[in-house]
Structures are given as structure tokens and as C-alpha cells.
Amino acid sequence: MISEQPAGKPSVADDGVVEVYTSVDAAQLAVLRNMAATLTMEAGFTVDSVEDTRLLVDEVCSTLIRNAVPGVQMLCRFQAEASFHLHAQVTASPDSVVDRSSWSWRIMSTLADTLVSWTTATPGQPTTLHIEATKASEGCP
């Protein structure tokens, strides 16, 4: 189930960014995949690029779910204009990193034009694991 963001509800910013807070649960992957597909279809992406973004969102979010601290929420920010942009983050254990030699990373690297992951941590605060990816579509206006 998509849950409310701390300050209210899922939102669309003035710049077209859609933010979704969801529980860290594999059952939510279908919702996130369909969000990406809808945004990229509306932006005029090719059918192949729409499917690539679905798979990309699935791999990014699955990776974060595997590294998440139980009971936290995942934040996904989507934007689709001339390219699809995804930024997803989750609270993770302090030693969590994305394994860049994993099969998942290889899939994400193949599907995305740019892909980066990092962690942010402040002493005494939880670690946040981030993954950011972009995918262009030759079918975009």
C-alpha cells in the first residue's frame, strides 16, 4: 500500500517530479513499476524504453528493499520528460552498500544511461542508501 508522506500525501512538484513514499515491501514493486510506465508513456517514450524503465525501477527498488532496515519507508522520486529520472532512497544499516559486482547492478547498468549509488550518514543518525538512474528515449519529443 502506498502510504502518506510525512508532510501530507504523495506529491507532484512544480518541476514534474512525482514523489512516492511506500513501505519496504516487494509487493509494492508493481505499483512503482506502473508509475514509471505511466510517466514514460505520457512523455512519449518508445514502447521498448517504457519496458526498460519498468525493469530499471524493479531492480533499483528491489536492491534497496534487500538493504533496508525493517519497518522503514522507501522514497522514490520520478520524472519523465526528455529522459526518465529515478532517485530512490531507504534507511539502511551503517555497513550497507550496493554491490557493484552483483547481477542486479549489471542489469541496472544495462538498462540505465547513467547509474550511481551512494550512502549518506551523520554520526548518531541512520544511514541512507541512495540509487539514482536516468534513461533516455529516442522517442521523446
Image: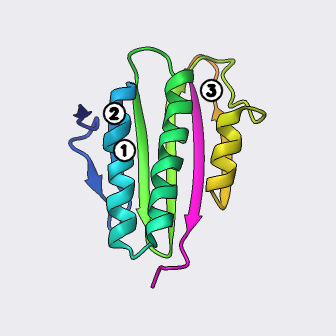
N-terminal-most mark, 3 or 1: 1
Q: Quadrant of residue 13?
A: bottom left
N-terminal-most mark, 2 or 3: 2
Q: Are marks 3 and 1 in contact (CB under 8 Å)?
A: no
Q: Are marks 2 and 3 in contact (CB under 8 Å)?
A: no
* Residue identifier under label 1: 32
Instruction: Look at the magenta stretch and give its main secondary structure.
Output: strand
Callout 3, which amino acid? Answer: Thr
Which element carries disc 3, helix, strand or loop?
loop
Give the residue furthest to the right.
101
- Circle 2 packing at 10 Å, graded few (<14), some (14-19), many (20+), is some
Callout 1, which amino acid? Answer: Leu
Callout 2, which amino acid? Answer: Gln
* Residue identifier under label 3: 122
* Residue identifier under label 2: 28
Residue 90 appears in the picture as rendered: yes
Q: Residue at x 33, y 28 (%)?
A: 27
Which element carries disc 1, helix, strand or loop?
helix
Q: CA distance from mark 2 to mark 3?
A: 29 Å
Q: Does 140 lie within the magenta span? A: yes
Bounds of the magenta segment:
126-141
- Circle 3 packing at 10 Å, graded few (<14), some (14-19), many (20+), is few
Residue nearest the viewer, comparing 63 with 23: 63
Q: Does 63 lie within the magenta span? A: no
